[in-house]
Amino acid sequence: MQAARKYGQAFLVGLQSNIIYRWNFAVRSFFSLFQLAIVFILWGAVFAGSPQVGGFTFGQTLTYFIVLLALQFFIGAFNEDYQISEEIRNGLINQFLLKPINYYLYRLSIFASARVVSGGIVLVPLLCLLPFARHTLSLPHEGWRFALAVPAAGLAAMIQFTIAYCFGLLTFWFLEIQGFVILSMAVEAVLGGQMFPLDLLPKGFFTVAQFTPFYYQMYFPAAILTGRIDHGLALRGLAIQVGWVGVLLLGAYGFWRRGLRRHTAVGG
């Protein structure tokens, strides 16, 4: 209970801090409608010559990208890696080394508070879009999809945050991590299904992608919600997600322990 209150307070502080920057999230969310407009135009051209691509209609594909956009604001790690990097470089991390605070859980609490704010704000433009796109959207009606999508989204958030956390900890070895982060973003954009649904890949590449953590960051929960994978694949995917969360947590712990050996507590 004491730990819950401690990190709950960190969550509330993070919530207050992110509410101050609510207009930043609002502008970003409204500009995301332009991204959807581009998606509509490009994929409309793709489907102009065929009613289906990869076994899915234009409505199903558009629904996938809208769900993906919503998930990005609800579970996506935007700049957590840079925030952690700044705290290490500026010595602000020193305060956590002398207090009974788990730095990972503290940053996770801040991450969760930011996603509550950004996720709540993105609902506004999506609700504005709904009257114009409701006849085009195509969501499946199986109840099990919504039941499995919730833990899938939660595990996807853990995977995204832990990867960002590990990249932030690279500052113990490198003063500048921008190159690593940009490389990670490029890989995530492709293997996370943000550029195109991964099931459009050749079968061999798609099979390999299913065993990478990037597959489970965005594509997996979006695919469950939009009917792109069946019940069996969804259950298997959840099991692999749990495995990746465990592996990444071990990696984060190793980075933290080894990084502290190199850390010089100056400043802060």
Image: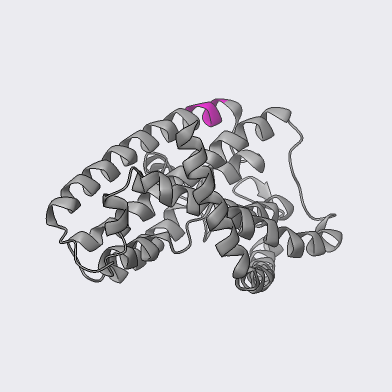
Quadrant in the picture for residue 224: top right
Q: Position of residue 128 (x, y in %)?
A: 81, 64
Can you say which quadrant of the picture contains the C terminus? bottom left
Camera-nearest residue between 140 and 218? 218
Camera-nearest residue between 143 and 190? 143
Camera-nearest residue between 81 and 200? 81
Q: Position of residue 130 (x, y in %)?
A: 81, 58
Q: Position of residue 114 (x, y in %)?
A: 55, 57
Residue 104 shows in the view: yes
Residue 72 shows in the view: no
Q: Which residues are magenta?
A: 232-236
Q: Position of residue 20 (x, y in %)?
A: 61, 69
Going 32% across and 59% down the picture, which residue do you hit? 168
Going 24% across and 63% down the picture, which residue do you hit? 171
Please say whether residue 98 is one of the residues in the magenta stretch. Answer: no
Whether residue 46 sits left or right of residue 191 in the image: it is right
